[in-house]
Image: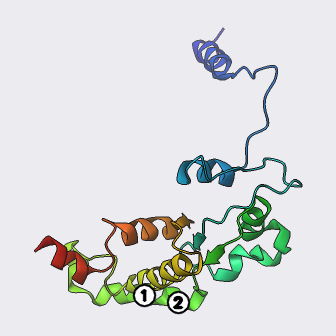
């Protein structure tokens, strides 16, 4: 036999993955993600989509990803509401769900970052020309959710760029560069 054929057969045989005889169905992604975000005493989720979970008053803010619109989290790609992230959270018992008010044309503002001299020295901040508008809206939405829900801690659920922008907004827990500069002084 040809040595190449023998090596190829051995390689393909070693690549086979044995599946366990019994596999549990995977839990929905969002359930797993939220388990890490909320204290276990506050959380009681149902894995059955037809059985409503215990009501959860903790406010959740959906932070849209780059190029996404608020509507994408209510009727994604013109699909029924029942297929949306918002509906999924509602089925799991969340009653205070907010979505950051972002539309597709808003994302053109990211190009404004090119006018920030710090962009060219790799010292630009998320609160600068490119994404400052997003962080301002996030701050307003967090404050609104916090007040409307009686001072409950707020969960930020970020999709794609919305995740890293939410993290940038939280930074050290202080809103805004001027407050951060004053705290550092």
As measured in the structure, the alpha-carbon distance from the residue carrying label 2 to the one carrying label 1 is: 9 Å
Q: Is residue 178 above or below residue 17?
A: below
Quadrant hosting residue 10: top right
User: Label 1 neighbourhood size at 10 Å, few (<14), some (14-19), many (20+)?
Assistant: some
Task: Say what secondary structure mark 1 lies in.
Answer: helix
Residue 90 in the image: x percent, y percent? 76, 66
Q: Residue at x 29, y 90 (%)?
A: 115
Check contact, mark 2 vs mark 1: CB within 8 A: yes
Q: Nearer the viewer, residue 147 or 76?
A: 147
34 relative to 164 in the view: left or right: right
Residue found at x 26% / y 87%? 116
**Looking at the figure, which quarter contains the C terminus?**
bottom left
Which of the pair 98/127 is nearer the observer?
A: 98
Residue 106 circle label = 2
- 178 left or right of 14? left
Residue furthest out toward the top: 1
Residue 16 drawn above or below residue 68: above
Q: Classify residue 174 by image quadrant.
A: bottom left
- Residue 133's mark? 1
Q: Check the picture and name the quadrant holding the N terminus.
A: top right
Task: From the viewer's side, name the closer residue of 55 and 131.
Answer: 55
Q: Is residue 19 left or right of residue 34?
A: right
175 relative position to 136: left or right: left
Earlier sequence position, callout 2 versus callout 1: 2
Callout 2 secondary element: helix
Q: Which coloring applies here?
A: rainbow
Question: Which label lies toward us, 2 or 1?
Answer: 1
Q: Position of residue 27 (x, y in %)?
A: 73, 43
Spot occupied by residue 178 in the image (x, y as percentages of width and height): 22, 83
Which residue sits at x=60%, y=48%?
41
Marker disc for residue 165: none
């Amino acid at each position: 036999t040809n040595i190449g054929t023998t090596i190829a057969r051995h390689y393909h045989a070693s690549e086979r993955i044995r599946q366990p005889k019994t596999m549990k169905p995977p839990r929905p992604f969002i359930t797993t993600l939220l388990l890490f975000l909320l204290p276990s005493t506050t959380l009681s989720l149902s894995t059955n989509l037809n059985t409503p979970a215990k009501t959860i008053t903790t406010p959740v803010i959906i932070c849209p990803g780059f190029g996404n619109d608020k509507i994408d989290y209510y009727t994604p790609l013109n699909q029924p509401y029942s297929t949306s992230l918002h509906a999924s959270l509602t089925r799991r018992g969340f009653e205070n769900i907010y979505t950051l008010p972002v539309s597709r044309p808003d994302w053109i503002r990211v190009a404004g970052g090119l006018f920030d001299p710090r962009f060219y020295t790799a010292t630009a901040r998320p609160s600068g020309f490119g994404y400052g508008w997003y962080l301002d809206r996030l701050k307003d939405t967090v404050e609104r959710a916090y007040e409307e829900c009686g001072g409950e801690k707020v969960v930020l659920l970020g999709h794609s760029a919305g995740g890293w922008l939410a993290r940038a907004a939280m930074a050290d827990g202080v809103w805004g560069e001027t407050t951060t500069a004053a705290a550092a002084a």
